[in-house]
Amino acid sequence: MLINQSGKAPVNGIEIYYETFGNEQNPAILLIMGLDAQCVIYGKNVINPLVEAGFYVIRFDNRDIGLSTWLNDSWHRSRPYSLEDMAKDSVELLDFLQIKKAHIIGVSMGGMIAQHIAIDFPEKVVSLTSIMSSGYALNPKVASKFSHKLILQVLPFFIKRFYVKNKYSNHKISVGSYVATYRFLRGKRFQFDETHFRQVFTESIEVRNGQNPRARYQQFCAIVASGSRLKKLHKIKAPTLVIHGTADPLVNPKHAEIYAPLIPNSKLLMIEGMGHELPKGALAEVLPEIIKHIS
């Protein structure tokens, strides 16, 4: 996996670190990563097949993570940035790279950002692929218990007004803790590749020094601040592929079943036994579908 170009782009009042792969004359793919995750999680197992299929691939660190701008000093829970802001980061990165339009692929929070791009900047989107994501992360309809429904409804109020120091808002940064988190997120069907994840998080934490302890909380607040897209999804004109695992322990599969039908010209692909993950076994099923979709 050879990096074609890398650097920091001045976008939306901050700097976004990016890397590109493949021939820049080929159709572009923008890969958007999820909550508290650096772009290196999109590894060669994802990027190489896309480059080999004839695409120019861009991966980047979202704001507050990796080698992009960390907003810890200027951030406050009463005025958080939003997913719309992060969508603008992505679009201005494409402009910086002089890319008129791209196939947009987002995972988890990245899928939410990708949806905002397709809604607000349709001229920039050739196709949309939204993976293990949601049209409304706090949708009470996906909760099975009344108490959980209530928590989802009042959570925005408490997040905006109160701050409680805890392991989610200011957690310990270590390779072991992140490996454990990703082990928890796996599903029931595919083997967990601990060696792979140790390599990924060693690079993220010990080589890049890019794991912001505030990213998880501040990016989650962006998700909360942006609310629901369910009434806006009909505006998406780009062909859309929605992918979700049936055993996702973080983003309930019901989310996909709710938001996918609201997008015109969309297809829903449920991967049996896949969790909140893209392991090697799942990629063997997912990547051919993505390449078929964007081709």
Image (cartoon, helix red, strand yellow):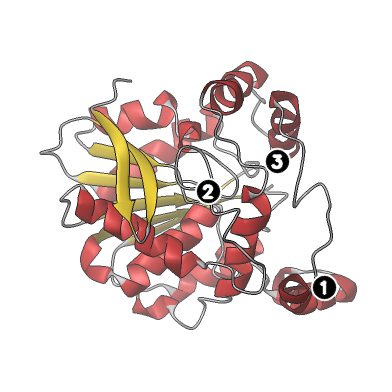
* Residue that numbered label 2 is attached to: 70
In the rendering, at what x and y percent does residue 40 appear? 47, 31
Residue shown at the point (40%, 24%) measured from the top left: 44
Residue shown at the point (53%, 44%) measured from the top left: 65
Q: Mark 1: which amino acid?
A: Ile
Regarding residue 171, the answer to whether it shows in the image is yes
Q: Tag 3 or tag 2, which sits nearer the N-term?
A: 2
Count the marks. Answer: 3
* Disc 3 crowd, CA 10 A, few/some/many (<14, 14-19, 20+): some
In the rendering, at what x and y percent does residue 112 appear? 49, 62
Residue shown at the point (59%, 50%) measured from the top left: 35
* Residue that numbered label 1 is attached to: 151
* Residue that numbered label 3 is attached to: 185
Residue shown at the point (70%, 28%) measured from the top left: 179
Q: Does residue 278 lie above or below 262 as drawn?
A: above
What is the spatial separation of the Cα atoms under label 1 and label 2, in whole angstroms?
29 Å
